Image (tube, rainbow, N blue to C red):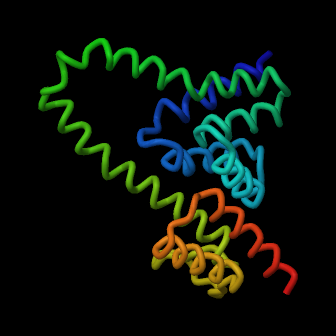
């Protein structure tokens, strides 16, 4: 029972402190699921996020359902999913109740102006995580960190460039893009 409550409150906490959608949750998911609780390795985490993005539904809910099921079965999946949706549900209902009263509030406008750059930073952190997991073979180093050998994964770069080129020119259906990238990854993995 304690494990089930811990799953609920873990995803409740992640959802409560995330503003900006699924990709803004990725750094918090990584911190909690990989670093703190060690439910997943970094590679398994990258695969989970990719699969959660490909399946129907929000990335946060799909990830919570996956981890909940992995840790405690069907009831764990249910409670982790409930944990990730509870803050949004409560906050949305509260906002709907007071929208007319607060819509012109200078304090609310100032708070949202402060939150937007934070959301952009969280999404940028998710982009760096995915770059490390798919294009670079070693973690990225920043100026204040100890230097490491810089290695690129040529297959990841080819797939990245191909997707960018296709998206900028013919803009196919997202499913076709993802399936094509998967097929290209399979083909390049055979080389």
Residue 61, above or below 172: above
Q: Residue at x 50, y 67 (%)?
A: 171
Q: Nearer the viewer, residue 149 or 83?
A: 83
* Image position, residue 157 (x, y; %): 63, 81
Residue 108, picture quadrant: top left
Q: Nearer the viewer, residue 66 or 170?
A: 170
Q: How many marks?
A: 0
Residue 43, above or below 183: above
* Image position, residue 41 (x, y; %): 77, 55
Q: Residue furthest top?
A: 97
Residue 156, above or below 10: below
* Image position, residue 167 (x, y; %): 51, 70
* Image position, residue 142 (x, y; %): 49, 76
Q: Residue at x 61, y 31 (%)?
A: 11
Q: Nearer the viewer, residue 93 or 6?
A: 93
Q: Residue at x 80, y 20 (%)?
A: 75
In the rendered structure, the answer to whether residue 77 lies left or right of residue 102 reads right
Residue 22, above or below 131: above
- Image quarter (top left, top right, bottom left or bottom right) of the N terminus: top right
- Image quarter (top left, top right, bottom left or bottom right) of the C terminus: bottom right
Q: Residue at x 69, y 57 (%)?
A: 46
């Amino acid at each position: 029972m304690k494990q089930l409550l811990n799953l609920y409150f873990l995803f409740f906490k992640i959802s409560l402190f995330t503003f900006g959608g699924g990709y803004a949750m990725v750094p918090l998911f990584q911190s909690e699921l990989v670093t703190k609780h060690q439910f997943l390795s970094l590679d398994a985490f990258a695969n989970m996020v990719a699969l959660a993005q490909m399946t129907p539904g929000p990335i946060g809910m799909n990830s919570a359902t996956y981890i909940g099921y992995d840790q405690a079965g069907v009831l764990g999946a249910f409670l982790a999913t409930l944990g990730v949706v509870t803050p949004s549900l409560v906050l949305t209902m509260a906002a709907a109740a007071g929208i007319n009263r607060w819509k012109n509030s200078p304090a609310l406008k100032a708070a949202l102006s402060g939150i937007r750059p934070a959301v952009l930073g969280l999404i940028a952190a998710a982009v760096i995580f995915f770059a490390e997991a798919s294009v670079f073979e070693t973690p990225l180093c920043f100026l204040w960190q100890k230097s490491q050998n810089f290695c690129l994964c040529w297959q990841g770069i080819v797939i990245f460039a191909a997707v960018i080129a296709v998206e900028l020119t013919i803009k196919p259906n997202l499913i076709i893009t993802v399936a094509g990238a998967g097929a290209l990854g399979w083909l390049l993995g055979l080389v």
